[in-house]
């Protein structure tokens, strides 16, 4: 049998498999190579064929044979594509032996509406508006249209200012929830494309939509309703291509009709009220009597730009069965049940119930319980997080699941107002942006595994349309600082590139004329227009991290101008390079929620120190972006600026004898992580950091800013065991303390709840906040050892360098990288290290094996130095390094005590 070929699989266009309705005129294409782990499998050339017919000739683009090992982000360079055009593509690759092989998947993509003039629809909605604090029912909209001939294909293009659910002939279109998500609706809104070909019939058809307030006119944070507009609006158009070659467009306009029905209130923060007695069965099908419905109000969208959705939509993705908690005594006519879903999740509850018409069930949600078993709702602040369902009295039972709201909860209280109701099923439904899970990490310590699960659940719950701080209280905002500190971890856990590209567009939209970046994105008008240090720096840190983890240079092309303008503004406002204040006089949030001496929310690390550190780092990143983009002079300017700020940092924040002026843990961490301590002072700063940690009983005192970097700088400065001590610490404050308290997500505060003090300040005490979950990147990159080589982003060349410690006996991680699956799994005992690694086809890796240099090494039982794919073996004082070609390796290192001892002696 001939050795496995290198077949291109998992063909992607703009991060998606077969995307429907994109508006990128030059989409980027990519694939994995499946070589069944053949050693050294590599692509030496590719040829892409794009045709206007399935399996047709490449009439749109034949790239020709391109001698190249590139297999991601290849820019389509064929004939210009039209609106609504579907194209099919395949790719042929040549491997390192010159063998050609073609993809067998029939991949395609379809363009959306590229020109504004393609839209033949008006924005429509109902008439009720409510007010800043008063909600109104959700309008139902419908229109029946006639299909007079056989259809070749048909699409619906739709979006809302608000959130919507579209329905055709009684069926829901697509599985997306809370579409179109949240953008600054004054500037842009994303539209969705649905293939309705199989749903249409010859004769009458009905398109319907339900409109919720969403972020557009519902409550956002604590500021009340109607941030962007007074009532929700729909924009939709049906485009039918008939088999006879004719096309027809039916857009929303005032011929549509609307009515208010069962959905009495629907708000993201407050909840949903639904009276099933007010339903109008069949409203979304032809033949429904809509004489009582009113003509929809139509208007324009004030020039809002319409973009095809670039991010995966929100979907309902996981279900949890409820576990009933102890019965609550019945009071008069009210019955109360409480449930535990076993997971702090973000979404809503689906109920299956049977009972008398008119009975109302109230659903209250909470993340925690009070000591007496009641729901702890104080931390929700003004978010009511309460749904109401009034039964229509269906003998066979009825199902309620809210549509346009989400809650952050683990516990549920059902209050039944009436007599006989049978609760047949209570299911928790988790919603989040449907990002593919790319990372898995586990190790021999079950508490650390729970921590990893908690990090992933906090990411799910807070990656809902935009990256948010928390999903439960009246906040749920796209805090730039939180996104920035978590982005590296996020990019390990999930394929975040599309999601963050989309959000980074909102970040660019939010940049002020002066160049500042707000504290939250999409921006709200009552929060800082300049987020200040570490918040505004998301403008540099997020694109750079997305670039490193995806290898997508285009993210830098899109974000460079925003980053550069931002740094120019910081420089102009802080001419002496010490970043004291923002243009608006705001000093920044500091090391948010640090437990330093001052014990205030912003910790004890001086704000100008944090500001100057981030100024240097962002200037460096903007220089790096310029470098990648080939902007030589900008690269020089920003690199020089970064150096000048670095020198200033040293002058201002170090004493003449070489210590930090305020040596908080975060100050030490920033100086080390951002390379602000001159080389000769690094070990001293690290020692000072370790002393502080030890003085606190091996505990950290960092807040949002220092925490994510802390274990990295410890490992990088020779204090790996201290990092493990912090990781494994169970006393508060620590990562594992909440785990020991039964946490299933990451808490906002280290001490959100303690046995001594109970709950922290309810004014700010979320139990699902991912910022402190930034330790996740360390688990992947240091414990398991899968790290990016910045010189070859997107894991084209991987660094595989596990650093075991802390008595952990084994760890494994897997990462579905842009080139395929990377894995690292190790097991160790005092004289042996077993390591299984996978280097995907068409990539290479630099491995560092943490064993004594004289360890006896084998690979798949054979001498290591003769293992195929292993080259450049070198022995350093505490490891063996080598290069690995693509493939799967089973490496074993063994040594005797004496050998290890000799090794130590010889150092
Ligand atoms: C949010 C944060 C945010 C912070 C800014 C809080 O209310 O929950 O996570 O970064 O404010 O200081």
Image (cartoon, helix red, strand yellow):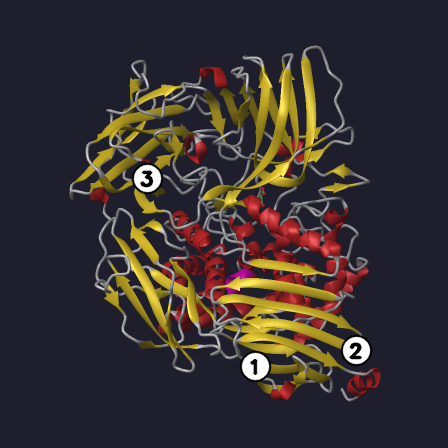
Helix, strand or loop at label 2? It is loop
* In this view, 395 is above or below 175: above
Residue 616 belongs to magenta span: yes
The answer to which image quadrant residue 238 occupies is top left
Magenta residues, start to end: 614-618
Helix, strand or loop at label 3? It is helix
The one of 757 and 265 positioned closer to us in this rendering: 265
- Disc number lying in front (2 or 3): 3
Q: Earlier in the sequence, mark 3 or mark 1?
A: 3
Say whether marks 3 and 1 touch (CB < 8 Å).
no
User: Position of 735 compared to 629: left or right?
Assistant: right
- Which labelled disc corresponds to residue 198? 3
- Which labelled disc corresponds to residue 883? 1
Q: Is residue 385 visible?
A: no
* In this view, 65 is above or below 773: below
- Which labelled disc corresponds to residue 252? none
Residue 21 belongs to magenta span: no
Residue, disc 2: 831
Q: Position of residue 449 (x, y in %)?
A: 70, 55
User: Position of 218 compared to 839: left or right?
Assistant: left
The one of 443 and 52 positioned closer to us in this rendering: 52
Ligand 1 under 8 Å from disc 3 Cβ: no
Task: Indicate the quadrant containing the C terminus: top left, top right, bottom left or bottom right.
Answer: bottom right
Q: Is residue 362 visible?
A: yes
Q: Position of residue 631 (x, y in %)?
A: 36, 71
* In this view, 798 is above or below 812: below
The answer to which image quadrant residue 712 occupies is bottom right
- Disc number lying in front (3 or 1): 3
User: Position of 109 compared to 663: left or right?
Assistant: left
User: Position of 688 compared to 170: left or right?
Assistant: right
Residue drawn at 21 percent across, 62 percent down: 79
Q: Earlier in the sequence, mark 2 or mark 1?
A: 2
């Amino acid at each position: 049998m001939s050795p496995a070929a290198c077949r291109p699989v998992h063909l992607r266009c703009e991060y998606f498999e077969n995307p429907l309705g994109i508006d990128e005129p030059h989409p980027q294409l990519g694939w994995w190579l499946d070589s069944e782990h053949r050693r050294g499998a590599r692509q030496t050339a590719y040829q892409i064929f794009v045709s206007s017919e399935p399996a047709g000739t490449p009439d749109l683009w034949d790239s020709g044979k391109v001698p190249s090992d590139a297999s991601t982000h290849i820019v389509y360079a064929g004939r210009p594509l039209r609106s609504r055009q579907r194209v099919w593509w395949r790719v042929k690759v040549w491997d390192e032996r010159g063998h050609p092989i073609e993809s067998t998947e029939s991949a395609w993509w379809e363009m959306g509406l590229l020109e504004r003039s393609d839209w033949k629809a008006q924005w429509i909605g109902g008439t009720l508006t409510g007010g800043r604090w008063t909600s109104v029912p959700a309008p139902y909209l419908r229109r029946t249209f006639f299909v007079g001939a056989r259809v070749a294909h048909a699409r619906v293009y739709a979006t809302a200012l608000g959130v919507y659910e579209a329905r055709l002939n009684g069926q829901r279109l697509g599985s997306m929830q809370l579409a179109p998500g949240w953008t600054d609706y004054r500037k842009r809104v994303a539209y969705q494309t649905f293939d309705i070909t199989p749903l249409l019939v010859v004769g009458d058809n009905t398109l319907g939509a339900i409109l919720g307030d969403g972020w557009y006119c519902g409550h956002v944070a604590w500021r009340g309703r109607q941030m962007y507009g007074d009532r929700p609006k729909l924009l939709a158009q049906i485009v039918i291509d008939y088999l006879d070659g004719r096309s027809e467009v039916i857009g929303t306009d005032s011929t549509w009709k609307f009515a208010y029905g069962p959905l009495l209130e629907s708000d993201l923060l407050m909840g949903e009220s639904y009276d099933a007695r007010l339903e109008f069965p069949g409203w979304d099908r032809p033949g429904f009597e809509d004489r009582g419905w009113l003509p929809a109000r139509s208007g324009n969208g004030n020039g809002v730009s319409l973009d095809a959705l670039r991010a995966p939509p929100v979907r309902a993705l996981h279900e949890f069965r409820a576990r009933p908690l102890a019965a609550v005594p019945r009071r008069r006519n009210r019955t109360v049940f409480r449930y535990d879903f076993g997971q702090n999740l973000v979404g809503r509850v689906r109920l299956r119930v049977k009972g008398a018409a008119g009975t109302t069930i109230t659903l209250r949600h909470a993340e925690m319980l009070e000591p007496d078993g009641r729901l702890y709702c104080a931390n929700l602040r003004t978010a009511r997080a309460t749904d109401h369902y009034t039964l229509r009295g269906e003998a066979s039972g009825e199902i309620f699941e809210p549509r346009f709201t989400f809650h952050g909860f683990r516990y549920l209280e059902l209050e039944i107002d009436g007599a006989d109701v049978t609760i047949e099923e209570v299911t928790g439904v988790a919603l989040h942006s449907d990002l593919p899970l790319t990372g898995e990490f586990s190790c021999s310590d079950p508490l650390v595994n729970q921590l990893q699960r908690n990090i992933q659940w906090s990411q799910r719950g807070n990656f809902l349309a935009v990256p948010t701080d928390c999903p439960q209280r009246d906040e749920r905002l796209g805090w730039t600082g939180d996104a920035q500190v978590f982005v590296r971890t996020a990019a390990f856990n999930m394929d975040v590139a599309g999601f963050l590209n989309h959000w980074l567009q909102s970040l660019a939209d939010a940049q002020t004329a002066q160049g500042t970046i707000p504290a939250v994105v999409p921006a709200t008008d009552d929060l800082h227009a300049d987020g200040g240090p570490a918040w505004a720096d998301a403008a540099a840190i997020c694109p750079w991290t997305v670039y490193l983890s995806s290898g997508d240079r285009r993210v830098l092309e899109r974000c460079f101008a925003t980053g550069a303008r931002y740094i120019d503004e910081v420089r102009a406002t802080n001419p002496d390079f010490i970043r004291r204040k923002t243009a608006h006089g705001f000093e920044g949030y500091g090391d948010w929620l640090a437990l330093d001496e001052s014990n205030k929310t912003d910790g004890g690390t001086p704000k100008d120190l944090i500001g100057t550190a981030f100024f240097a780092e962002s200037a460096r990143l903007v220089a790096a972006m310029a470098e990648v983009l080939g902007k030589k002079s900008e690269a020089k300017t920003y690199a020089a600026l970064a150096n000048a700020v670095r020198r200033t940092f040293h002058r201002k924040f170090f004493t003449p004898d070489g210590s930090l002026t305020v040596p908080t843990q975060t100050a030490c961490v920033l100086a080390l992580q951002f390379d602000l301590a001159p080389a000769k002072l690094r070990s001293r700063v690290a020692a000072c950091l370790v002393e502080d940690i030890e003085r606190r009983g091996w505990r950290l005192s960092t807040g949002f800013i220092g925490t994510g970097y802390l274990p990295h700088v410890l490992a990088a400065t020779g204090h790996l065991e201290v990092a493990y001590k912090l990781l494994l610490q169970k006393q508060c404050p620590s990562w594992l303390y909440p785990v020991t308290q039964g946490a299933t997500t990451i808490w906002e505060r280290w001490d959100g709840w303690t046995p001594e003090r109970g709950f922290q300040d309810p004014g700010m005490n979320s139990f699902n906040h991912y910022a402190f979950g930034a330790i996740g990147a360390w688990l992947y990159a240091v414990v398991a050892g899968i790290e990016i080589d910045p010189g070859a982003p997107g894991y084209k060349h991987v660094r595989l360098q596990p650093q075991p410690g802390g008595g952990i006996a084994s760890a494994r991680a897997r990462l579905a990288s842009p080139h395929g699956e990377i894995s690292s799994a190790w097991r160790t005992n005092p004289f042996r290290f077993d390591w299984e690694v996978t280097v995907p086809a068409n990539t290479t890796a630099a491995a560092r094996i943490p064993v004594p240099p004289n360890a006896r090494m084998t690979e798949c039982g054979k001498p290591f130095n003769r293992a195929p794919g292993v080259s450049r073996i070198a022995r350093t004082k505490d490891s063996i390094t080598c290069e690995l070609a693509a493939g799967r390796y089973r490496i074993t290192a063994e040594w005797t005590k004496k050998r290890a001892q000799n090794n130590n002696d010889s150092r």
